[in-house]
Image (cartoon, rainbow, N blue to C red):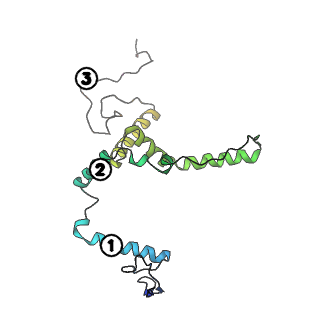
Amino acid sequence: MKQRRRRKCLHCGELFHPDARNAHHQRYCGEPACRSASKAASQRRWLGKTANREYFRGAANVERVRAWRAEHPGYWRRGEAQTSPALQEVFSTQDIETDTESAALARTALQDLFGAQAIVLIGLIANLTGSALQDDIARSARRFQQLGQDILSGGTPVVGGARDAQNPLGSSPAPPGTASVQLGRPTPGA
């Protein structure tokens, strides 16, 4: 059996035995800080190549991502939970004990749920719009925010105007001769 030679880690300077499957180019030991340094060095090398500098930017790359997502609809929804059923044991039914501690635990769990509001909102918008592109989600979020502000301020959104929920602020002027209509209330002076 061939003896593996020890190598000096480029980050911490300690000697280590490289993994046999990766010995020909492993330069960092397995310590978490050294693995992080290895990842950072790898990213610097990758970004140092001129072909990779604009890989995630620009209109051409946005179109590349859109084309890939069009070919792979719903890829973000796939996961381990859908591919294999959950293993569950059958338990006999038991009476649930109710006391003040369980009520306190329920409040804590509800607080945890509201801490994830932003994540839930992004998922909801992606589900409603059918798109996971950040630009589409941001556009929809701005529309929903404007509509919510209009509702909470007591005003009614002007349909088709500059403050329409379908149009972001200032995107289109209101057509001449349009008047807002309030449903469910008599017109003033009538």
| Gap between marks 2 and 3 measured at Cα | 45 Å
- Nearest to the observer: residue 15 or residue 184: 15
- Nearest to the observer: residue 43 or residue 100: 43
Q: Which residue is mark 3?
A: 177
Which mark lies nearer to you, 3 or 1? 1
Amino acid type at mark 1: Arg
Q: Residue at the front extreme?
A: 1
Q: Which residue is mark 1?
A: 44
Mark 2 or mark 3: which comes first in sequence?
A: 2
Query: In the picture provided, is 154 more to the left or to the right than 98?
Result: left
| Gap between marks 3 and 1 measured at Cα | 59 Å
Q: Which mark is residue 53?
A: none
The crowd level at tag 1 (other Cα within 10 Å; few <14, some 14-19, many 20+) is few
Q: Which residue is mark 2?
A: 68
- The answer to if 153 sits in the magenta stretch is no
Mark 1 falls on what kind of element?
A: helix
Dominant secondary structure of the residues highlighted in magenta in the image: loop
Mark 2 falls on what kind of element?
A: helix
| Gap between marks 1 and 2 measured at Cα | 26 Å
Position above or below: 89 against 187: below
Amino acid type at mark 3: Gly
Q: How many marks?
A: 3
